[in-house]
Image (spheres, rainbow, N blue to C red):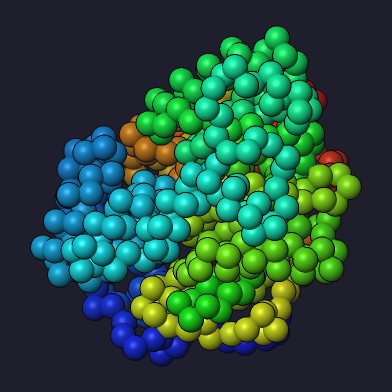
Amino acid sequence: MARSFSPLSRYETGEFMFKKILIANRGEIALRIINACKELGIPTVGVYSVADRESLHVKLADECICIGAAASSKSYLSIPAIIAAAEITGADAIHPGYGFLAENAHFAEVCKACGITFIGPKAEHIRLMGNKSRARDTMIHKKVPVVPGSDGPITNEAELPELAEGIGYPVILKASSGGGGKGMRIVREKSELLSAYNMARTEAGAAFGDETMYMEKYIENPRHIEVQIVADNAGNTVHLGERECSIQRNHQKLIEEALSSVLTPEQRREMGNTAKKAASAIGYSSLGTVEFLLDGDGRYYFMEMNTRIQVEHTVTEGVTDIDLVKLQINLAAEAKLPFTQRDVKFAGHCIECRINAEDPVSFMPSPGRIEAFHAPGGLGVRLETAAYSGYTVSPYYDSMIGKLITFGHDRPEAIARMKRALEMFFIEGIKTNIPMHLKILEDEDFQAGNLTTHFMERFARK
C-alpha cells in the first residue's frame, strides 16, 4: 500500500546522536526499543532483575547489567541502580519505555543532573500532566473542552454535596495523581458520596502517595479516544490520528484500533487540532497522547495526557508507516520533525489485542513456564512479545506477555486477520486471554463498531 513518505532513517537527526542507550524496562517494550536502536546503529544496554535473567531483552541487548532483586521497587523502580548502570556502561541516554519510571518527573530530573538524556518530555511537563487536577485546570485555561467538574482539587469533604449537586449526578471522583483506574469511584446519589470519597482517597494514598481528589461529571457510555501527538523542540507539533481504546476491563485496555470507525474526517481533524493545541499550550516536546471521552452526540472532552510512548503505539504505526520509537529517539537528540501535518496520510485499519497470562474467565494471573509457543504470522500480522518456548512468566510483573497486531485495507479485513492469527497463536503451559479475544471478535456489537467503555460489562453478561 502506497505511503506519503518513507519511514524515518538514522540520518534524519539533529545535531548529535546518542552513543549508547540504556533501556530502563523489560519485556516486549525493551525488545521494541532494541529493534529501533539497531536500525539507528545505536548500541544498547539492557537492565534486568534476578527474576529476568533468561529474558529475551537480556539476550539481545549489546550489554546487560543486573540491577537488583525481583521486586520492582528493588530493580526497575530503583533510580540509583539504573543511573549507576548507565554510568558504569557509559550510556549517554535512557529510554524508560512505558510503566515503571516512564512518567516519573524526579527520574527525568536525576537523568538531567547526571548528564544523561531522558528520552521523553521535560520533567515539568511530566509533573504537570501527571497531576490530573492541574492538567485539567491547564486545559480549561487554554480553552480545551473538559468534562464539567470541580474547580481544582477538593479541599474539604463538607463541600462534596453542594459540588455534586452543582455538577449533576452521576459524578465520578478521581485521584489527582491517579491512573489505571485506581482512586476512582462513580457516585449516582448523595447517600453514596461520602463513603465513596473516603474509599477513593484511601486507595489513592496507598497507590500514589497522594490523597488529593477532584470531581467530574460522569459521562454515560462514552468512547475512549486518544490522539497521538509528536512535537519537537522548535515548536512544531503534529498529530498522527486517533486510536479507539474503548474495549477495557477495570480501566485497563484490552483491544485498541486505529483509526476509530466513528469519526468523520472533519471530526478527526478537529480532535487532532485540539490535541495539538493542548500540547502546544504547555510547550510540549517528544511523543505524547492526549486522551478524550467522546459522548453519543459527538462531543469530546479532555481526560488526560500521557507523556510517554503508549502500549498501543503499534496501531498508529500501522496506519501511518511511521516508526514512533525511532522518531522519539530522534526528537530526544534534538531533531526537528521531518514532516508536517500535511504530509501525514492514513491508510487501512489496524487492531491490537493485548495477550495476557491470565485465566480468560476469572482474569486471575497465570504465571509459570511456557512449555510450547507457536507465533502466528502471515500477511498483515505483527507480534510484539518477549515470550518463547521455555520462558517462565514471572509473578512479579504485569501479566501482559505480548501484543498481537493485524493490518488490513479496512476494518473487516483487519478483524478477519486477527481472528486467523489468534487461532494460530499456540501457547501451552499457562492460561492466556486468547479465547476471550476470539469471543469479542465474534460479538455483533464489536463487529458493527458499537463500542463504549462499558462494552466488557455488557459482554460479560451475554
Image vertical order of residue 337 relative to residue 313, above or below:
below
- Quarter of the image with the C terminus is top right
Q: Nearer the viewer, residue 40 or 58?
A: 40
Residue at 50% x, 51% y is 129
User: Is any part of residue 307 visible from this angle?
Assistant: yes
Which picture quadrant has residue 329?
bottom left
Residue at the left extreme? 88
Which picture quadrant has residue 451?
top right
Residue at 43% x, 54% y is 126
Image vertical order of residue 327 relative to residue 201, above or below:
below
Residue at 17% x, 43% y is 68
Q: Nearer the viewer, residue 13 or 351?
A: 13
User: Is any part of residue 457 visible from this angle?
Assistant: no
Give how far across and how far down residue 288 sits, in percent: 53, 61
Image vertical order of residue 153 relative to residue 170, above or below:
below
Give how far across and how far down residue 456 sits, in percent: 71, 33
Give how far across and how far down residue 304 sits, in percent: 59, 49
Give how far across and how far down residue 142 sits, in percent: 64, 59
As drawn, is 159 to the left or to the right of 104?
right
As drawn, is 234 to the left or to the right of 240?
left
